[in-house]
Image (spheres, grey):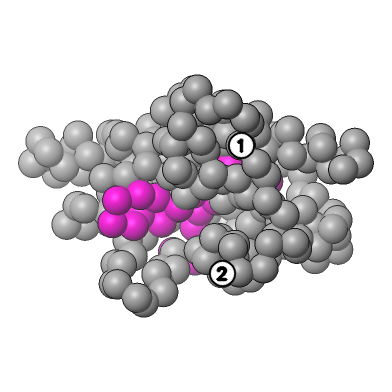
Amino acid sequence: MTRELALIDDRLRAAAARLAAKGLMQPGDRLSQRIPERQTWIWLVLPAPGAAAPAPVHWAASAAGQRPELHERLYARRADVGAILESRPAWASRLGQLPEAMPALFDEQVRHLGLGVGQASERPGAPVPLDFYPGANALALADRVLCCGMGLERLLLNAELLEKCAKAFVLAQSSGRPLRRIPWLVRYIANRRLLRDEREAAACHGAGRRSVMQAGY
């Protein structure tokens, strides 16, 4: 393996370690990253604590028949997505069990995660429907959640943001009190900026380049 490929692998392992340290990734959860300059993507499964060897990083180009189905479908469907986390964090993993989907509660949520967190039912033997809101970056499944980002660093921030918002929503749901939504104009402006960034990310990926994370709001 060349040094370049080894660095790519190490960065994915470091991202998984950061997520695990914050409780956002559990053993058996999957993390993947698009590598547009090589027209492929990679993934790993978080090992159990104290594993004798670091998590192996799999390259999709050389792992036919073993690729995580949800990740493969999502990369094919969303050209803007540069990294995906399929995990079971404490709060976000409960979203798929609630009677209603999590709406837009915070402006930061709309800016980076989209207008809401969709819910997708899972039926035995059937593909999971990818019922994302347009341009959204989170989807609640029965016992886990999919979180996306335009790149690996953006994904790490999105995963932290999703867990924070999910905690607030789950606790508010359990209180039985009505939820206050942010004004429509704030939702419109924040979501428009997200969609603009995603179009730029899709163009970068299509040209074989990594997307650059936007620093401003």
Pointer 2 or 1: first along the chain? 1
Badge 2 amino acid: Arg
**Nearest the camera: 49 or 111?**
49
The residue furthest bottom is 126
The residue at the point 77 percent across, 44 percent down is: 212
Residue highlighted by disc 1: 55
Mark 2 burial class by Cα count in 10 Å: few <14, some 14-19, many 20+ = few
Tell me residue 119's x, y (percent).
32, 61
Q: Is residue 153 above or below residue 61?
A: above
- Image position of 19 (left or right of 213): left
Could you tell me which residue is drawn at 87 percent across and 43 percent down? 1
Residue receiving disc 2: 73
Give me the disc on residue 122.
none
- The answer to whether residue 200 shows anywhere in this view is no
- What's the distance in space between the residues labelled 2 and 1, CA to CA? 23 Å
Q: Quadrant of residue 123?
A: bottom left
What's drawn in magenta, residue-wise?
A: 133-155
Q: Nearer the viewer, residue 32 or 207?
A: 32
In the rendered structure, which amino acid carries the disc numbered 1?
Ala
Question: Is 149 contained in the magenta span?
Answer: yes
In front: label 2 or label 1: 1
